[in-house]
Image (cartoon, rainbow, N blue to C red):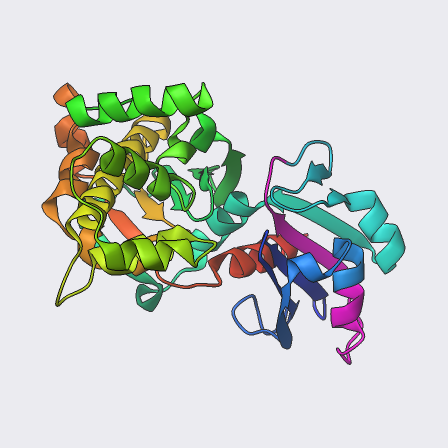
Amino acid sequence: MARGGLILLAGDVGGTKTNLGVFSSEKGPRVPIAESTFSSGDYPSLETLVDDFLDHVDVKVERAAFGVPGPVVAGRVKATNLPWLIDEKKLKAELKLLDVVLLNDLEAVAHAVPSLEPADLHTLNEGKPVHEGAIGVIAPGTGLGEAFLCWDGSCYRSYSSEGGHADFAPNNPLEIDLLHYLQRRFGHVSYERVCSGRGLPNIYSYLKESGKADEPDWLVEQLTVTDDPTPVIVNAALDPDKPCELCMAALETFVSILGAEAGNLALRVLATGGVYLGGGIPPRILPALEHQRFVEAFRGKGRLSELLANIPVHVILNPKAALLGAACRGLEI
């Protein structure tokens, strides 16, 4: 457990950006002593990025905890979307720290869940949470992450998962056709292929090429000049004055698939304590998530639909939940 005066470096490492913060056991994980955001691609390794941060921090750090993208195996991870091989022992030695712990980025978000406050959340399904029941976390961002928490008799323990790479299971004729379309392109089709920042453009391409709706010229122009079509599609779908029919159809399909997979996660871990939607996308598409189609897809589990109806579903609004979770984990060392 955290000891008096412990000074911790915590990090949320991402393919695009990395958030770092220094925390103390006295102030806790919600009050950083220092904090900065870095462009991950500007550095050849996590060690050099951390060195740059610590050069500008006037405090002696003792330990570190980092949420990292990818599966952590034996204290090592090949970071997703970064040319970094991150190793606990190497970090400990090069940064001259007493201890370093790596955890999957979704495991970091899961660690934050017990510390989240009402202002950090937006509820989609009130449900009837079971005290000390298991909790599921699903996070569509650049990819699709999943994690869960279980009560061990005294506190919640967080566990990582690579469930986002499990086989996509369509639920209606349109999704069946979408699966066939993507199988021809990719072979294996995971939930991440259809339910992430990478996945939404795949849905859009299928709907466009199958003639479900026309692609307007102004949208073609916007998509041509961007490296990331997802924000363009989302903004066009949610435009209050002139929503794009094709983008609306893509986002509606995305929401239904997310609802179904969130329900699948709830069944897999029997998440009677609730399901939490993390990642960068859910806060941006709240109007679409509040539509009945999300909850219907979440609850639509046949004989177990009533069980799902009683499971709370919340969107995590706090954009630094992964950093908070890494700090929570580190202060337990």
Residue positioned 85% across, 47% down in the render: 90
> In the rendered image of this protein, does residue 328 appear above or below residue 276?
below
Observer-nearest residue: 193 or 281? 193
Q: Which residues are magenta?
A: 50-71
Observer-nearest residue: 211 or 87? 211
Residue 208 percent location from the top left of the image:
24, 38
Query: Can I make out residue 3 in this image?
Result: no
Residue 6 percent location from the top left of the image:
72, 66
Residue positioned 48% across, 54% down in the render: 227
Observer-nearest residue: 149 or 143? 143
Query: Can I make out residue 92 in this image?
Result: yes
Q: Is residue 308 left or right of residue 75?
A: left
Residue 136 percent location from the top left of the image:
37, 39
Residue positioned 32% across, 35% down in the render: 271
Q: Is residue 68 left or right of residue 47?
A: left
Q: Residue 42 in magenta?
A: no
